[in-house]
Image (cartoon, grey):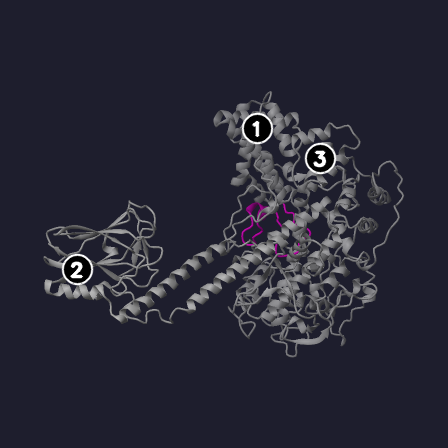
């Protein structure tokens, strides 16, 4: 085929095919509600129904209203006298929604619910109205939970230490894990597929362990390394990479609903990032997982031997604070309990994979978790202060511990601040309650003075003069000064509008102080000529404490009549306030001179007081300037989000139907009965019991903790957990595909010191992990639960973004720290444009990066051990149209064109290796070459290579790991 036969924009064709492939490869949505939908119902819908609706619309209501039952899914769908209350996916036809809006019926009758609650109901209905509730059957006796019978469920049984199973094909397993996998395959008469190609394996391993693509050099080095230890060497290098913690820390941040803002008004949590960095460091340092659990639950209660450890432990408790709560709720008792419920949810799902919060309003419908157990554990958290209440409540921030050196500096600084504040207060106490008690010495208006007065605001200024009102003894709007600089460059001229020729006494107003100039040159220009006077402005003015007389002069209206003030040759501040021209005659001159030159005793006393008070004010101002400078130089003490222990530990009463204002019997603090073997931990009377709860969960004998984390690690490596419902090991969750393998790995996990890295290493070293994703799926195992081949997994949003940045050479590998402006108060409209790794992108609940939204980023308000993985057209459209993708493609094209290659085919080969870690086939190479040549002829080489790279970014091979 001739090159010229290709359309101008072949990229459009290529990407159109990609869009079509999205639909061909997408899975048909199941009718069963997802765990996320059920979680939403349990957290947002059921509590509202229980609190506001069950009194009149439940099976046990004393007076059932309108024949409507709202305590089961059937009741909602069937409805009452007016028809179905809910029509899934249709809010317009759902009477419940119109009733909540007060559009038809007005429910609840006590008052309309808040708008955000109504919005939750609209979202729930629009999303299919997931509801696990069944109709209540009245037997006369409430259902009682049999804890001992509940322990028959696999998840509540102690972890066993199974023997390594025998297999027929002894040559296939690479380690013990493979024995468990192969034994199941052989029992089903299946065989594992071939091993993955080296190019496929190295790309899979890099993304699994560090979330970044291997470079062509790294790929070639591995592929061409004949050593049997070549793969093992790469595994160890990646496990020891600082980027390992960035990849695996992000996994854990999904579980703990990490975020840096709350939805309410977009309030930003300025210190949350410290927890993110703590998590990354924990995975990089491979700190034991049991210690990790304890630190997050009760780090502030652990004895620490070092400053670093004390800081780390306190930061770890941020785990308890990041819930997305309605901080505007004015029912603070309810708000506190909602916060506790959210904490208990992340603890139970995150560490134990249990839906304990389903028991807030009633005994758990499916699992052996009575309401008493809920309030036993909630009571522990209720004894912890997590919010400071005001009209809008707020999370708690405290200073982090600092070194003795910093503490000494801080103490010295605080002592200096205290000393200055004491001195200022003492000086202020020496001032009269009203410093303007003497009318003669106060601010005076120009119009209130006799004669012709020229204020400084009306004078002609040369150079920069600074206006001021610091000393409250001035004429007009204030006075000005030369800032004690620009000496010889500044003048100020006072020109009066004299009504007639005659003799005038000239008076000059200024405020005196010790920092003033002592030799201010003032020249009076009159009909008598020029007269130069040197004025000492440190001395107080003798006339009314405001003016000094410059003498009496004859002025002619048609002649020169002005006063010039200069700063030439002066040292200190030159002050200019106003000039007063008083008309006099010869007969009054002597008396006036006498009056001006000698003050009465009373005036002298007043003048002395004024001078004293002004001196005090000046000293106060000087000290206040020092105080401001000192406060700015304070040692910076970092803060962290945390919780605070209450003064004593108290048990919590059961809240009937979850209502904080309807209390039942006391539920002593404790732990989940069905998962507790032996004596329950004793709860202290002087603490919450968090530390006891944490130690119970981190006990090596605990039936859930090690298995839950082991399963999470398997899920993060394979894309599917041994238990697929990674956040739910209860009876509504799935059973493990390989229960003995889960037990075996969990036992080894604990025996090897709860080391996550060792667990990961054992899994990726297995032959199972290294299998090809190409294989024949047996009809008896359509979902590949037996792992006859590797799952084909799509890259998550962060890996896609980081990969494009890495390939284009733009990725900034700077680790950690705050990655948004320190003074940012709201997350609305925030755009993260820094080329840092995606784990450092601020997780703002109202403003997630668009690539996160498009490619199924975890909901930062919920526990998300398993992300949704969709395959929809908007993802392909994002890769086709988004400026970020286009920019990285262009940068990559520039890089490709700047490097030296033998020919276009070599450059094409390199582009394939950069993006999808393999060489192109001959057909792909020819199509690529023809496209680049034809596009170059019509636009440019840069544009052609940009479109070519963008088509590779848009390919399924780039988005997926084989």
Query: Percent position (x, y) of residue 246?
Result: 65, 45
Q: Earlier in the sequence, mark 2 or mark 3?
A: 3
Query: Percent position (x, y) of residue 211?
Result: 66, 41
Side of 755 relative to 495 (left or right):
right
Residue 767 location, quadrant: top right
Q: Which residue is mark 3?
A: 202
Query: Residue 133, relative to residue 251: is it above or below?
Result: below
- Boundaries of the magenta span: 842-871
Q: Residues within 10 Å of mark 2 (few under 14, many from 20)?
A: many
Query: Percent position (x, y) of residue 225?
Result: 75, 28
Tell me how far mark 1 sits from mark 3, CA to CA. Answer: 23 Å
Element marked by disc 1: helix
Q: Earlier in the sequence, mark 1 or mark 3?
A: 3
Tell me how far mark 2 sits from mark 3, CA to CA. Answer: 97 Å
Q: Which residue is mark 1?
A: 896
Q: Is residue 199 visible?
A: yes
Front in this rendered view, residue 355 or 15: 355
Q: Which residue is mark 2?
A: 505
Residue shown at the point (61%, 30%) measured from the top left: 911
| Screen quadrant of the N terminus | top right
Residue 369 location, quadrant: bottom right
For residue 783: magenta?
no
């Amino acid at each position: 085929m001739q090159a010229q036969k290709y359309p101008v924009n072949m990229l459009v064709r290529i990407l159109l095919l990609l869009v079509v492939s999205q639909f061909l490869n997408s899975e048909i949505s199941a009718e069963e509600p997802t765990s996320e939908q059920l979680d939403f119902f349990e957290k947002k819908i059921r509590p509202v129904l229980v609190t506001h609706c069950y009194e009149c619309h439940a099976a046990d209501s004393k007076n059932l209203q309108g024949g409507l039952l709202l305590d089961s899914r059937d009741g909602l769908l069937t409805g009452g006298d007016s028809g179905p209350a809910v029509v899934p996916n249709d809010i317009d036809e759902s009477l419940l929604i119109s009733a909540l809006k007060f559009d038809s019926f007005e429910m609840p009758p006590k008052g309309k619910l808040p708008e955000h609650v109504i919005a939750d109901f609209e979202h729930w209905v629009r999303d299919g109205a997931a509801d696990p509730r069944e109709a209540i059957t009245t037997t006369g006796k409430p259902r009682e939970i049999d804890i001992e019978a509940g322990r028959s469920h696999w998840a509540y049984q102690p972890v066993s230490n199974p023997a390594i199973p025998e297999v027929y094909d002894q040559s296939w397993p690479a380690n013990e894990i493979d024995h468990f996998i192969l034994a199941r395959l052989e029992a089903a008469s299946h065989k594992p597929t071939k091993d993955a190609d080296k190019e496929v394996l190295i790309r899979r391993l890099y993304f699994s362990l560090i979330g970044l693509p291997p470079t062509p050099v790294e790929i070639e080095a591995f592929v061409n390394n004949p050593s049997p230890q070549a793969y093992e060497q790469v595994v160890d290098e990646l496990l020891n990479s600082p980027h390992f913690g960035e990849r695996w820390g992000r996994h854990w941040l999904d579980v703990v609903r990490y975020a840096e803002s709350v939805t309410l008004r977009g309030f930003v949590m300025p210190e949350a990032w410290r927890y993110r960095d703590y998590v990354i460091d924990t995975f990089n340092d491979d700190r034991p997982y049991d210690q990790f659990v304890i630190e997050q639950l009760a780090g502030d209660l652990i004895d620490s031997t070092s400053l670093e450890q004390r800081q780390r432990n306190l930061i770890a408790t941020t785990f308890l604070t990041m819930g997305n709560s309605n901080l505007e709720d004015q029912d603070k008792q309810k708000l506190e309990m909602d916060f506790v419920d959210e904490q208990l949810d992340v603890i139970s799902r995150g560490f134990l994979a249990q839906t304990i919060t389903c028991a807030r309003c009633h005994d758990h419908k499916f699992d052996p978790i009575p309401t008493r157990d809920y309030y036993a554990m909630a009571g522990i958290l209720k004894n912890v202060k997590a919010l400071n209440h005001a009209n809008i409540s707020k999370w708690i921030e405290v200073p982090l511990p600092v070194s003795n050196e910093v503490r000494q500096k801080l103490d010295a600084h605080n002592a200096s601040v205290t000393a200055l504040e004491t001195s200022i207060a003492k000086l202020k106490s020496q001032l009269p309650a009203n410093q303007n008690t003497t009318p003669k010495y106060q601010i005076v208006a120009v119009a209130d003075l006799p004669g012709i007065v020229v204020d400084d605001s009306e004078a002609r200024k040369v150079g920069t003069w600074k206006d001021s009102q610091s000393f409250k003894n001035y004429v007009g709007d204030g006075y000005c000064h030369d800032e004690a600089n620009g000496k010889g460059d500044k003048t100020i001229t006072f020109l009066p509008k004299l009504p007639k020729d005659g003799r005038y006494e000239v008076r000059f107003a200024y405020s005196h102080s010790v920092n003033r100039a002592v030799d201010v040159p003032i020249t009076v220009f009159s009909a008598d000529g020029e007269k130069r006077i040197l004025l000492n402005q440190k001395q107080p003015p003798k006339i009314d404490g405001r003016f000094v007389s410059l003498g009496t002069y004859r002025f002619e209206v048609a002649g020169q009549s002005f006063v010039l003030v200069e700063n030439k040759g002066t040292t200190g501040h030159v002050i200019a306030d106003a000039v007063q021209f008083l008309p006099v005659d010869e007969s009054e001159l002597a008396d006036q001179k006498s009056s001006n030159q000698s003050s009465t005793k009373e005036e002298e006393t007043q003048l002395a007081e004024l001078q004293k008070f002004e001196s005090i004010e000046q000293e106060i101002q000087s000290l206040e300037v020092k105080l401001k400078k000192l406060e700015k130089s304070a040692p910076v003490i970092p803060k962290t989000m945390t919780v605070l222990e209450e003064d004593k530990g108290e048990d919590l009463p059961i809240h009937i139907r979850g209502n904080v204002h309807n209390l039942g019997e006391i539920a002593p603090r404790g732990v989940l009965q069905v998962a507790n073997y032996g004596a329950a931990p004793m709860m202290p009377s002087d603490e919450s019991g968090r530390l006891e709860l944490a130690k119970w969960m981190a006990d090596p004998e605990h039936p859930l903790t090690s298995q839950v984390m082991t399963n999470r690690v398997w899920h993060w490596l394979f894309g599917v957990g041994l238990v697929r419902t990674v956040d739910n090991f209860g009876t509504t969750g799935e059973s493990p595909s390989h229960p003995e393998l889960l037990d075996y790995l969990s036992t080894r996990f604990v025996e090897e010191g709860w080391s996550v890295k060792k667990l990961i290493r054992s899994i990726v070293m297995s032959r199972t992990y290294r299998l090809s994703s190409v294989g024949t799926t047996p009809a008896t195992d359509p979902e590949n639960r037996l792992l006859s081949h590797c799952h084909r997994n799509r890259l998550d949003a962060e890996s896609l973004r980081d990969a494009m940045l890495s390939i284009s050479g733009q990725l900034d590998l700077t680790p950690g720290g705050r990655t948004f402006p320190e003074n940012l108060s709201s997350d609305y409209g925030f755009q993260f444009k820094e080329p840092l790794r995606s784990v450092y992108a601020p997780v703002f609940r109202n403003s997630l990066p668009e690539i996160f939204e498009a490619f199924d980023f975890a909901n930062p308000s919920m526990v998300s051990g398993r992300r949704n993985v969709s395959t929809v057209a908007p993802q392909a459209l994002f890769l086709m149209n988004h400026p970020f993708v286009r920019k990285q493609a262009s940068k990559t094209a520039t890089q490709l064109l700047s490097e030296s290659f033998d020919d276009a085919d070599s450059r094409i080969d390199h582009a394939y290796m950069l993006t999808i870690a393999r060489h192109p086939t001959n057909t792909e190479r020819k199509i690529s070459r023809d496209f680049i040549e034809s596009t170059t002829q019509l636009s440019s080489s840069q544009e052609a290579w940009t479109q070519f790279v963008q088509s590779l970014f848009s390919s399924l091979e780039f988005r997926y790991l084989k």
